[in-house]
């Protein structure tokens, strides 16, 4: 019991050694790697950055070929640090558990990694360190069908690229809306709808953070109005739900609050047309259509069309 308790608080390297199986595996480790990020489920943790510390150990099957001092023949330390940086940059997270899971999944994408220990601790919430530790194996990842990143460029190219359609408030309220939903439903691409704010005036405040939330909620009100007008339109708020909808033929209406507030690079305000452009880039959209407005512009190669409210036949 005493030994079990000691191992529970030991470094992941000691836990790896103590729980090793019969196979002889190599180990690479990352110790006391600290990043300063915005993370946390509590309101007090929003809008502020805190230090989090990573300790990661990866068990690696030894190479069957001579290394010849060639870095391409080993699992690099960069595999670990890049996994951490990628997941931190992807979106703002509430839970250390989520960050640990995603980091482990990304490391295990390298088939040479047999097992990974991930410990993450918050250093600024209490006098001590608050954290979580997980252990994940290649076998678990294979059984669960986890693929953190595409295995090949061809697989990456096969990812779904949606048609993002921004419907102005006038379009949502117009008699032309059924024609637009019919035209969008007939497209070969998965469709995600973005909308402008409801016509009802939103409350005004002098506090920018509060005003941003109010404005985002005004957009979501109109998303629900759209869903009420056509049952094919399903309001969703998370990236996971949006990706599921793309893969299952669902026409999703984006409720932006969660994705925007959790993102590191979202526009500072809550202008719905600018958010639609940012969203289209974030989801690698094949096409963005602004309906009933000129919309936002940028200098990227994203295909952007601007059509009038009565222009569904031109989609």
Image (cartoon, rainbow, N blue to C red):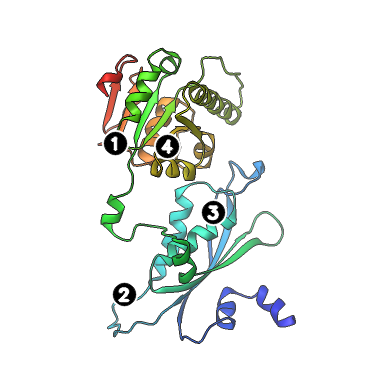
User: What's the residue at 35%, 19% (across, down)?
Assistant: 179
Closer to viewer: mark 4 or mark 2:
4
- Which badge, 4 or 2, is on the more N-terminal residue? 2
Q: Quadrant of the N terminus?
A: bottom right
What residue is drawn where x is 49% and y is 68%? Answer: 140
Is the Cβ of the residue at disc 3 closer than 8 Å to that at disc 4?
no
Mark nearest the camera among 1 and 3 is 1
Does the residue at mark 2 contact the one at mark 3 (Cβ under 8 Å)? no
Q: Identify the residue position indicated by label 2 in the image.
A: 71
Q: Quadrant of the C terminus?
A: top left
Q: Quadrant of residue 314?
A: top left
| Residue matched to label 4 | 250
Give how far apart the Cα atoms at labels 1 and 2 are: 44 Å
* Mark number displayed over residue 36: 3
Residue 187 visible: yes
Label 4 close to label 1 by CB (< 8 Å)? no
Q: Is residue 74 left or right of residue 214?
A: left
Q: Earlier in the sequence, mark 1 or mark 3?
A: 3
Q: Quadrant of the rendered structure where residue 180 is?
A: top left
Element carrying mark 2: helix
**Mark 1–mark 3 contact, CB under 8 Å?**
no
Q: How many marks?
A: 4
Q: Nearer the viewer, mark 3 or mark 4?
A: 4
Reading the image, the residue beneath label 1 is 188
Mark closer to the chain start, 4 or 1: 1
SS at badge 1? loop
Vertical relation: 289 (above or below) 301: above
Residue 236 versus residue 179 in the image, above or below: below
Write the residue at 56% across / 82% down.
17
Q: Earlier in the sequence, mark 1 or mark 2?
A: 2
Where is residue 173? Give x, y as percent.
Answer: 45, 14
């Amino acid at each position: 019991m005493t030994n079990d308790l000691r191992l529970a608080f030991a470094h992941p390297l000691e836990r790896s050694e103590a729980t090793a199986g019969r196979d002889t595996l190599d180990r690479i480790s990352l110790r006391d790697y600290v990043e300063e990020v915005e993370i946390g489920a509590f309101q007090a943790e929003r809008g502020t950055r805190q230090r989090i510390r990573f300790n990661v150990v990866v068990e690696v099957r030894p190479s069957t070929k001579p290394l010849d001092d060639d870095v391409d023949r080993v699992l690099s330390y960069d595999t670990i640090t890049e996994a951490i940086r990628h997941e931190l940059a992807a979106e703002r997270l509430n839970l250390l558990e989520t960050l640990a899971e995603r980091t482990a999944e990304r490391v295990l994408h390298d088939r040479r990694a047999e097992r990974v220990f991930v410990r993450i601790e918050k250093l600024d919430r209490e006098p001590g360190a608050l954290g979580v530790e997980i252990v994940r194996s290649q076998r678990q990842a294979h059984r669960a069908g986890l693929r953190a990143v595409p295995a090949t460029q061809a697989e990456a190219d096969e990812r779904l690229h949606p048609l993002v359609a921004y419907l102005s408030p006038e379009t949502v309220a117009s008699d032309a809306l059924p024609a637009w939903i019919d035209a969008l439903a007939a497209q070969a691409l998965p469709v995600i709808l973005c909308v402008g704010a409801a016509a009802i005036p939103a409350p005004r405040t002098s506090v920018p953070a509060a005003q941003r939330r109010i404005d985002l909620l005004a957009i979501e009100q109109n998303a629900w109005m759209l869903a009420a007008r056509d049952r094919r339109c399903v309001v969703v708020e998370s990236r996971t739900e949006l990706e599921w909808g793309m893969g299952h033929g669902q026409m999703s209406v984006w409720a932006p609050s969660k994705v925007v507030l959790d993102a590191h690079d979202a526009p500072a305000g809550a202008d719905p047309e600018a958010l639609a452009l940012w969203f289209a880039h974030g989801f690698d959209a094949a096409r963005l259509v602004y309906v009933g407005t000129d919309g936002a512009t940028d200098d990227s190669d994203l295909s952007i069309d601007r059509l009038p409210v009565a222009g569904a036949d031109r989609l």
